[in-house]
Amino acid sequence: MGEKLADLEYQPGFGNHFSSEAIAGALPRDQNSPLVCPLGLYAEQISGTSFTSPRKLNQRSWLYRIKPSVTHEPFKPRVPAHTRLVSEFDASNSRTNPTQLRWRPEDVPDSPTDFVDGLYTVCGAGSSFLRHGFAIHMYTANKGMKDSAFCNADGDFLFVPQAGRVWIETECGRLLVSPGEIAVIPQGFRFSIDLLDGKSRGYVAEIYGAHFQLPDLGPIGANGLAAPRDFLAPTAWFEEGLRPDYTIVHKFGGELFTAKQDFSPFNVVAWHGNYVPYKYDLHKFCPYNTVLVDHGDPSVNTVLTAPTDKPGVALLDFVIFPPRWLVAEHTFRPPYYHRNCMSEFMGLIYGAYEAKADGFLPGGASLHSCMTPHGPDTTTYEATIARVNAMAPSKLTGTMAFMFESALIPRVCHWALESPFLDHDYYQCWIGLKSHFSRISLNETNIESTEKKNEASE
């Protein structure tokens, strides 16, 4: 593994048209599909959008490989079946539930479990068959994928590791993704996950019929938030030789199928295009924040967005809450109480979240659905207002929380609602909120107190 890490290289940029060769001269120079490719390779295109999508939206890459990916036996339903993956949400596999939900971190199992077996759906909406919707999964794993690769035909995967580094081999090259970083594997790419620390746990967002893009910055201007240059695509790397009984695990309509082949799918010697896996370090995010009054809307912390046809409305936003300075005057600085037309699934990578002093743990999750009220817990609220006369600038440190936010209303899977890690006492974090109502305003009380102090001094 040390050798792998030593020769790992990336190409910077978001949405770029990349070119990469593991052997010089492997890329055709004048066309995409010559009669005979350099080095006797096969040309194969992978398309992430329709051929006739507008040029600015069109995504595709050309792969030059030792053997084409079509060389495999017929797909068969995976045995045993994976019963906790969902891509079409209805009453047969999930339920609507407007209650605020929170889950404690799930334990990594003792029995051998790779990424595929450890992946399970928590909630989602829509349908991969109709090419519109999303799913939110979590995973726990304690072993790498041996002699097998995974392919998601349903949509894009956004990985958020919470514990344990993951080594992802893809057809375009290799990615090392640590907690505090994310990776996106677009629809259709084959990949395999190994674990560098023995165990791993994390979150996965999946989107159907769309791809992630950088949000528009609007009045912020040309810079800030996630910089395009900080996104890293892999460089070409390949495996050759026989790999008897290599298994391709194909996710199609939420079901898993397998096909056997006698070679590694990571046999791409060169490639070029703009449809490619990539990673991003969340610590490079440049947050913008309030500098006078009021708490800013969380949308200002959007890293990636998958838009809908309706302007400003997201199929799924990926939003983070990183370390940052809090300087607002006369302001309740934690997130305000609110009800939202969007639905919010939150996770915590490390540290503590500013609005939840108790119970929201790294590796855990919460779901606040459309128009369900939520906000700071009692402990956070009382501690904040107690500092009303001592609100100096302060810096949030040692924390990284995130949110998957969608305009669609999620249905929650049965097993998530029946999980032993579901926190049935979550609602109690708000029960202690008491009335501070007084017919005398706080400002009037402060004025009266000041006048009394002045009279005493005279």
Image (cartoon, rainbow, N blue to C red):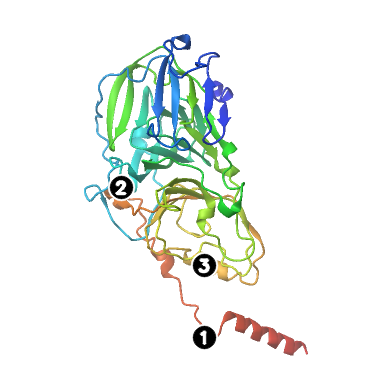
Q: Amino acid at mark 2?
A: Gly
- Disc 2/disc 3 C-alpha distance (Å): 36 Å
Q: Is residue 91 above or below residue 274?
A: below
User: 370 and 7: which one is in front?
Assistant: 370
Instruction: State if disc 2 and disc 1 touch (CB < 8 Å).
Output: no
Q: Amino acid at mark 1?
A: Arg
Instruction: Say which quadrant the C terminus sits in.
Output: bottom right
Mark 1 closeness class: few <14, some 14–19, many ≥20 residues within 10 Å: few
Locate residue 20, reporting x and y percent: 53, 22
Nearer the observer: mark 2 or 3; the answer is 2
What is the quadrant of residue 149 in the picture?
A: top left
Locate residue 433, reporting x and y percent: 45, 71
Q: Amino acid at mark 3?
A: Tyr
Left or right: where 263 falls relative to 80: right
Judged from the image, the secondary structure of the residue bearing numbered disc 3 is helix
Q: Residue beneath label 3, please?
A: 381
Q: Residue beneath label 2, please?
A: 126
Q: Residue furthest left?
A: 92
Q: Is residue 315 above or below residue 54?
A: below
Q: Is residue 266 above or below residue 291?
A: above
